[in-house]
Image (cartoon, rainbow, N blue to C red):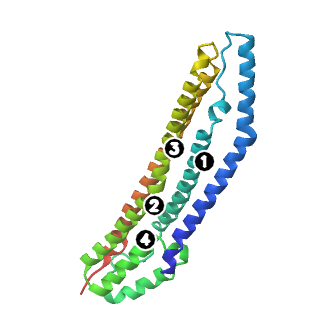
Amino acid sequence: MARFKTRAPNELLYSLFAFIIVAIAVHTVYVTVVRPRAATVLAEQRAAMQKDPNYVAQRSVYVVLKDWEQESAIILALWAVAVIGYKAWAARGERALLERDLVNVPEGMRILPEDVREYARPLEALPLPDSARLLPRALLVALYRFGATRNVQDVSEAARGVCEGEADRLDSELSMLRYVAWAIPAIGFIGTVRGIGDALGEAHKAVTGDVSGVTAGLGTAFNSTLIALLISIVLMFLLHQLQLAQERLVLDSETYLDQYLIRHMQVR
């Protein structure tokens, strides 16, 4: 059991440290680069508009990114990408086992219930990173069930149950990533509401001809929504690619079990 308990704590620690590192790195960039340059650009634009009423300000990426809603969305997105990368790396390790003949049954050879221990021994001797993966676990369950029940149909159902359980586990572990993919646009909409509120608060100045407060508030509203939606599109694409890779892994594992193990089983 110790072999199967090591994965969740490792992933939890990775997620925690990844979030801390991403948050510190992004906030540092914002404090030292984005917000100072955004303030400089806005000051230059105000000075240019005072000199020339017909001056048209150019959009600056620093101004678009300067608010805390954009910073929060970027932090969550980069953290989610780090977690997706970790899960993709784990799926790649699982898929590497599909290229190996773990049971080594020659063509034409039959596996009898008395042979279960012989074929299970190499699987039990696998090192920890490999022994905790889906394919070795499913192979061992199939072999043990065959030795206990001497029924190939029970073996097929047991192996399929392991694969279905793994599919459910992988799907449940994506729930936090799905929440983040939903939360990022929500943060953008928070910026929209805040920006519109700020613009309405400065509306009385627009009567006197000072529309800078209104335009600043509307800029906050539109910029936060723009960045959040763009990030969400990219993140959802990566999330769906990860889910597709995991589903293919489970299906290919079931095919491996049928091709390399179950079809060789025979009861006297």
Kind of residue indicated by mark 1: Ile
Check residue 75 in the rendering and tell me which mark sits there, or answer none: 1
Image vertical order of residue 176 relative to residue 74, above or below: below
Q: Position of residue 125 (x, y in %)?
A: 51, 82
Q: Secondary structure at mark 3?
A: helix
Residue situated in front as seen by the camera: 256 or 192: 192
Residue, x 37% and y 78% (percent of image)? 141
Residue situated in front as seen by the camera: 217 or 126: 217
How many angstroms separate mark 4 from mark 2 (CA)?
Answer: 19 Å
Kind of residue indicated by mark 2: Glu
Residue holding disc 2: 173
Upstream in the sequence, badge 1 or badge 2? 1
Q: Secondary structure at mark 2?
A: helix
Residue situated in front as seen by the camera: 154 or 229: 229
Upstream in the sequence, badge 1 or badge 4? 1
Check residue 90 in the rendering and tell me which mark sits there, or answer none: none
Residue situated in front as seen by the camera: 191 or 151: 191
Camera-side mark, 4 or 2: 2
Task: Using the rendered view, name the quadrant where residue 48 is placed.
Answer: top right
Upstream in the sequence, badge 2 or badge 3? 2
